[in-house]
Amino acid sequence: MIAIQAESTNPYQLAMQNFEKAADVLELKEDARAMIRSPERVLMVHVPVRMDDGHIECYEGYRVQHSTARGPAKGGIRYHPGVTVDEVKALATWMTWKCAVVNIPYGGGKGGVRCNPKQMSIHEIERLTRRYTSAILPIIGPDVDIPAPDVYTNSQIMAWIMDTYSMTCGHMVPSVVTGKPLCLGGSLGRNEATGHGVFVTVACACQHLKLRLKSAKVVVQGFGNAGSFSAHLLDGAQADVIAVSDSRGCAYDPDGLHIPKLMLYKERTGSVKGFPGSESITPEELLALDCDILIPAALENAIDGRNAGAVRAKIVAEAANGPLTPEADAILDEKGVFVIPDILCNAGGVTVSYFEWVQNEQHMTWDLAEVNSRLEKVMNRSFQEVLDLHQERKVSMRTAANVLAISRVVESNNFRGLYP
Ligand code: NAD
């Protein structure tokens, strides 16, 4: 039995617990751990924004570069009322491991602004974005640190970031951000890339567990970019997506929701709540539904020591970053649930971001088939590498992914001569 005590909800502390576990497997010495445990750079900024009614509001923002051992820092920007420096540090750390696990030549970074974009006008969000960009401008750039979308940021916001950066250079610099609109150097396939990567890893997991994807019951928590495209692709493969949720409510249909119609409904109404023909259930009931595949695709710590025991899925695919606390991990492990860890499961987004950056740097555009076939190759190979380590070392998929990632970062540091 696992004792249930109040566990930390600090994402950075939780990220560090998983780091130490993998470092133990690798028998890393303390000096090597110390070098990659803490972020290389943490920038905190205050962003004054003139609101539509004329008054000025000050927002706190961050940009964290956890590691540039393997290349420029790479990671999204989050606009959310819950943003803290420790959350951004955790997300930047996960980006380092994520880029390493799929073996793309980037380090890890992340940014965030504590704000509630749902209560701001489009003009206020534009002014916030331009001011925040100018505040972090000294530490971003195509060869230094390349932002991308994350929770409540999108291609429009990336376009404003690129424009603000480009204004200071006197010419357009598309490769300073990824996740841009297509007409400004965005890549085909980027919008759905995270969901596409989730889909590939879920298909690999089903194959490994000899579980049929066709008619498998799927539950998705968080119907935003990552969650909705994961659901859409699984629906396309004839899985039954029986329940989805967002911050406002849930939609449940035991016979399977019509995902294309639900996507249009969410676009029109702003929520999945009240989707015609669906039943409304509570977020707790959603996590406890009898299903084959559960996809947490919202925020960190969604499944913790208190609710993990209720999970009945065979596979948990972490489309979100850090949705399981270490205590939840232990409980799911004991129940025999196969967890596809975030740094592997949702790496499709950063992989196609990398493809976008490569296309921008080379002044080339790839067609969708090329983007998707390269993405599938990366995701299939990475899943297999993590699975091999999981089986060889007899560790969880999460520890295996962390071991693979951390060993690659340490190897880069060794070759660069950063260790004695
Ligand atoms: P998004 O803003 O497009 O969507 C977030 C969704 O989560 C929204 O539908 C929101 O309503 C919902 N949500 C928020 N709180 C919720 C709650 N308590 N319960 C249920 N739903 C809730 O964001 P996104 O880009 O899809 O990011 C979601 C997660 O995926 C984050 O953890 C993010 O870091 C991760 N991720 C995103 C990408 C990407 O390319 N977008 C890549 C890798 C990882």
Image (cartoon, rainbow, N blue to C red):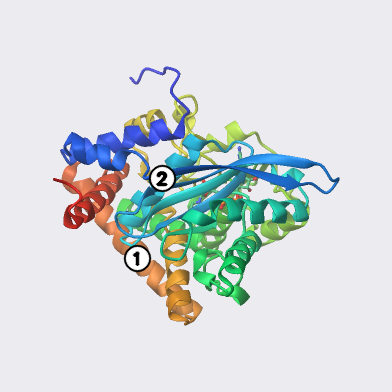
Ligand 1 within 8 Å, label 1 CB? no
User: Could you say which disc has been placed on residue 378 in the image?
Assistant: 1
Q: Residues within 10 Å of mark 1 (few under 14, many from 20)?
A: many
> Which residue, as the protein is rendered here, is positioned at the far right?
53
Q: Is residue 254 left or right of residue 58?
A: left
Residue 203 image position (x, y, % from top left): 40, 59
Kindly identify the residue that appears in the image at 48 percent across and 28 percent down.
9
User: Could you say which disc has been placed on residue 177 in the image?
Assistant: none
SS at mark 1? helix
Residue identified by numbered label 2: 41
Residue 352 image position (x, y, % from top left): 45, 66
- Where is the C terminus found, in terms of image quarters? top left
> Which residue, as the protein is rendered here, is positioned at the far left?
420
Q: Please say whether residue 194 is visible from this viewpoint.
A: yes
Could you tell me the amino acid type at mark 1? Val
Q: Which numbered disc, 1 or 2, marks the residue that appears first in the sequence?
A: 2
Please identify, in this view, whether the residue under mark 1 or under mark 2 is nearer the observer.
2
* Residue 26 versus residue 267 in the image, above or below: above
| Distance Cα–Cα, label 1 vs label 2 | 29 Å
Q: Please say whether residue 316 is visible from this viewpoint.
A: no
Q: Is residue 11 left or right of residue 388?
A: right
* Residue 365 versus residue 387 in the image, above or below: below
Q: Quadrant of residue 380?
A: bottom left
SS at mark 2? strand
Kindly identify the residue that appears in the image at 38 percent across and 37 percent down.
15
- Where is the N terminus found, in terms of image quarters? top left
Q: Quadrant of residue 198?
A: bottom left
Q: Is residue 412 left or right of residue 221?
A: left
Q: Say whether marks 1 and 2 touch (CB < 8 Å).
A: no
Residue 81 image position (x, y, % from top left): 64, 38
Frontmost residue, 377 versus 107: 107
Could you tell me the amino acid type at mark 2? Arg
